[in-house]
Image (spheres, helix red, strand yellow):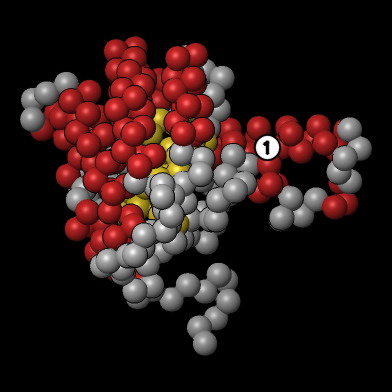
Amino acid sequence: MAGAPQPQMNMVPGCPRHVAIIMDGNGRWATQRGRPRLFGHHAGARRVREIVESCPEIGVDYLTIFAFSTENWKRTQVEVAGLMNLFRRYIIKETKVLRESGVRVRFIGDRVRLDDKLIHLMNELEAATEHNNQVHLTIALNYGGRDEVARATKRLAADVAAGRLRPEDVDEETLPRYLDTHVLPDPDLVIRTSGEARISNFLLWQSAYSEYEFIDTLWPDFTREEFTRLCTAYGGRERRFGGVLR
Ligand code: FPP
């Protein structure tokens, strides 16, 4: 039955339940090979498939990937159009396998700037996989953490103005209910590839207590073996959430 949990093999002890990844380095990977940047993005898309497939083997229930940021519109028109085309092709090509392998897909980010055809495909993929629960794949597309908090605050303010929410009732539990990620647990582990040690506006609220791994590997070279190694290393970490070691 699609979506029914399958017996797991090779589960990593202490595996992070939710891993979020900043997939960086596609451009440099292509340049190193004397190829256009889009060549790197296509190679990156193939890695997405491999990493999603590996989640149930490792024991990762939630995978969130940063595919396109609110700042990425500053790239050349050729690169932006190429990426949008790649996202459309990815959805068309992967829908069947994602549905049949029990992956539930969600998109986060602001859809307003995306073209109608892409929005339609995103809605269709979400609907086609909505009964799955083997792995929860969230794709951040036209996503920015500050933009997300601003949009959430706008909705929260509207509820206050309409009398549905009292300002004195707003606390740390309130805002997350308005975020794009409201149905997801916070990420346990955030990985960034390609040697940059910054979070670039990704899951700002949600990653307050996440563990981080900044690795030199360029995204198109990131393998399931390296993913497994990072999840295994996470299993050995002591998370304190501001408390003290016991
Ligand atoms: C960052 O590398 C990568 C992106 C802005 C795009 C991420 C997209 C993919 C991995 C393609 C496939 C995704 C899906 C969901 C199908 P960069 O271009 O900034 O690399 P650079 O820092 O080396 O220039």
- Kind of residue at disc 1: Ala
Give x and y (percent) for residue 158: 81, 32
106 or 33, nearer to the observer: 106
70 or 113, nearer to the observer: 113
Residue depicted at x 58% and y 33%: 147
Give x and y (percent) for residue 163: 91, 37
Give x and y (percent) for residue 15: 37, 67
Q: Would you place residue 162 above or below residue 78 in this image?
A: below
Question: Where does label 1 land, which residue?
Answer: 152
Left or right of 20: which side holds 203? right
Residue 55 can be seen in this image: yes
Residue 83 can be seen in this image: no
Residue depicted at x 68% and y 42%: 178
Rendered image quadrant of residue 225: bottom left
Left or right of 143: which side holds 178? right
Q: Which residue lies most toward the right here?
A: 163
Q: Residues within 10 Å of mark 1 (few under 14, many from 20)?
A: some
Label tally: 1
